[in-house]
Image (cartoon, rainbow, N blue to C red):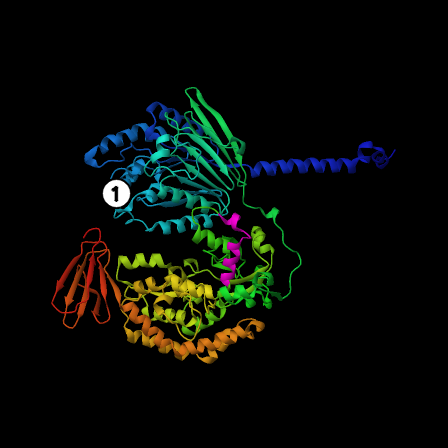
Amino acid sequence: MSFLTRLQNNKILKNLPFLSFIAFLISSSVLAQENETESKEKVHSVYITSNTALRSKQSNDLILGEIVKASLKEEDSATLVLIGNFVPKNGYPDKDNGRENVEKDLSENLLARINDFKGNIVFTPGYHEWQADAPDNIDDLESFLQDNSRGKFWPNDGCPIESESLGDGVQLILIDSQWYVENWDDHPYINNKCEIKTRAQFREEFNDELEDNQKKTVLVAVHHPVMTNTRLSFWEKMVGAGNQTRRSPQLGELMGILETIARQYNDVIFLSGQDKNLQFIHDDKIEQVIAGITEKASKAKPDEDDGNFAGYEMGYAKLNINRNGSSNIEMHKVLPSGTEKIFSKEISRERPTLEEVSWPETKLGATTSASVYTSEETDKGGFHKTIWGEHYRPLYSKKFEFPVLYLDTLPGNLQVLGAGGGHQSRSLGFIDKDDHEYTLRALEKSALQFLQTTVVTTHYIEDYLENTIAERYVKDFYTTAFPYGTFPAGKFMDELGIFHPNSELYYVPKQEALGVYNEEYGDELYMFEAHVGDENKDLEIFGNADDILNTSDLMLEMRETKDVYVDEAMFIRARLLDMLLGDWDRHEGQYEWAEFEEENGKKRYLPIAKDRDQVFPRTDGFALSMLRLASPPIRAMEQYSETVKRPKWFNHAGYPLDKAFIRNANWQDWQEQVNYIENNITDEVIKDAFDVLPEGIVEDAYVDQIKATMKARRENLEDIARKYYKHLAEFDMFTGTEKDDKFLITRKSNGLTTIELKNEDGELLAEKSYNSNMTREVWIYGLDGDDEFKIVGEGSNLVPLKIIGGEEN
């Protein structure tokens, strides 16, 4: 028998196709298990404890010793976070009041115990750390801990927030909650060393950190828990417990804000330590871990049906983060004989994966028909229009032909960064191969986002207000703005030499380039524009600037030195264009600043105008007319007409910026910019600017009306500017620097006052004169430094002055 015949008769060979199929299934199963194992591979462990100063030495030795032992067995990276109350109840004292004893106790009973921890060590302050001359002593405590251990003290300098990467898709945000809760009147210089100066800035920063790290698992270490099941004592229920329970308005506000912002993102886990127990709480999209157990444990009432936990035995919490974004929380009880795991629960990943989303394989053509709203959303009855106005509703639901954008057709190999947006806009960020960043911003704004970020900031409401009257009315109000105004506005800025992000209008379908964001983005109208930030400073549209700063950072720069200044002529030009376009919402977030270093070492800043969402407003209707009478801020929302009726109220949002950056300009300077605009924004320029829009929009009657009104307002621009200039001149601020300054205030006849500012070397830094016929009051700020104020001369009908010193005055 031949070899071939024997093979043909071989039973095994006859079953080879079947066996091959079985082998394929087995290998696929093995690979799937390997992939699952790899996806759940632990990448980082975080050990959590708190209230070490409230526990006995014996308990601390036991807990900290077991944490160190466990860390030595870790194969991956690890971090130990001590979340407040690691100094005694009276705080970290001054050198003359027992600091040496506290430092000795910290060295022997805390730092020595954790010295061998295998990984990062992080201290974050709590209530005790603020009890002795804070924030100065917090700064000293930070130095002591970091000089005598491997640990880091975050946030530093008594500031509110710090964010640090733990690698492999894990971000640690540390918040000093006591900073928020403190009565700032007791700490006049609380924020001197901090970039964040207000609680509102802190809220924005926390949101920005979550937005920047939305592709990671985010751990938020904060002493006071955002959620807790700890029972209040009878005394706490009756009279409260100072500012240390959620019955405190300030603490309740902070916890509400943190929870509300966190619910708008995925995979956020809070780590806390104030409560004297061990807890795990899962509520909707966020988790809370508490590890502040002491001998006098506080009882809690967990909802065990929801997988929550509370424990009262000495121990610690451990959080394991996996490569696939899921986590596992463990609670460990410590005994003289070792540790015992008393609770464990998996925390699933909330972020969508690419496998969970889809997009059409068939692509659209070069253009497609679309609108901002549907016709059902703008179909209102006669009574509604009488009360609320006509607005631009027909334009919002009218379909036009728009160019279609597939992002992979753009140069630079764009990659999606993540979702973003402000109080009402929805956007996606992208980055190209040269690290330049771009933004897709939807023309349809989010009413729910507006209500959440501006109206109800301490309770999460988005899921509850969807498809409600509140959402519908806010969306209807948005139709007061001309929906396509950003694009002709860009052409006017080009004509006047004002930097802007160069927005372009597209219909963006769902597509592969949107990745996991196909769930919430795509199949609507967007503007595509360059992101205004330092990563794009070398772009030609921003003048190849040396840097790009936001308004807050620029103000800090100007406090430091007088060698930093805003080009007032260009800023006046930009502000006059705001008035010409009817753009009433020009707050500090609407401008960034391009930096140009001069040969003499000084830095000149030019405005970059962005977010032209409110140009050419149509705020008609009885209700808005009544609201304008009742509420001063709403008076800014003037119907776009031949003039600005009340320049004072129209510029309500921009007034603080104007006072900060227009310091030396006189009426002649304003007049020059009025003339420049009148000479450059000609009838032909107005026509060409609107011609950038799709043909159907250009031919719309609304556009014809806007162009005619703009030409008429241009003729009235000088009168508008003069009225606003007089309003600006009524009150002024004259500021020094944070160095040692000398102010010479000279009183003269006829109501004249001159103020000179010199540095300690006698160099003249600034000078300005005031006339009581124009100016009602001047406030002079010394800021920091050892300043000298000298008043000379006499006169009549003088301008009232207020002199405000700084920390060293």
Residue 409 appears anywhere in the view = no
Q: Is residue 97 above or below residue 472?
A: above
- At a point 14% along the width and 72% down the height, the residue shown is 749
Q: What is the quadrant of residue 85 in the picture? A: top left
Q: Magenta segment range?
A: 461-478
Query: Where is residue 613 drawn, in percent x and y?
Result: 46, 64
Q: Secondary structure at mark 1?
A: helix
Q: Main secondary structure of the magenta part?
A: helix
Q: 376 above or below 209?
A: below
Residue at image position (26%, 33%) is 90
Quarter of the image for residue 225 reads top left
What residue did someone put label 1 on?
136
Is residue 451 shown left or right of residue 381?
left
Q: Is residue 9 left or right of residue 186?
A: right
Point out residue 373 in the picture as x, y percentages from the top left corner.
57, 62
> Residue 557, image x and y in percent?
30, 58
The answer to if 191 sits in the magenta stretch is: no
Q: Position of residue 500 (x, y in %)?
A: 43, 66
Q: Hey, which residue is sitting farthest top in the picture? A: 337
Amino acid carrying mark 1 in the image? Asp
Number of marks in the image?
A: 1
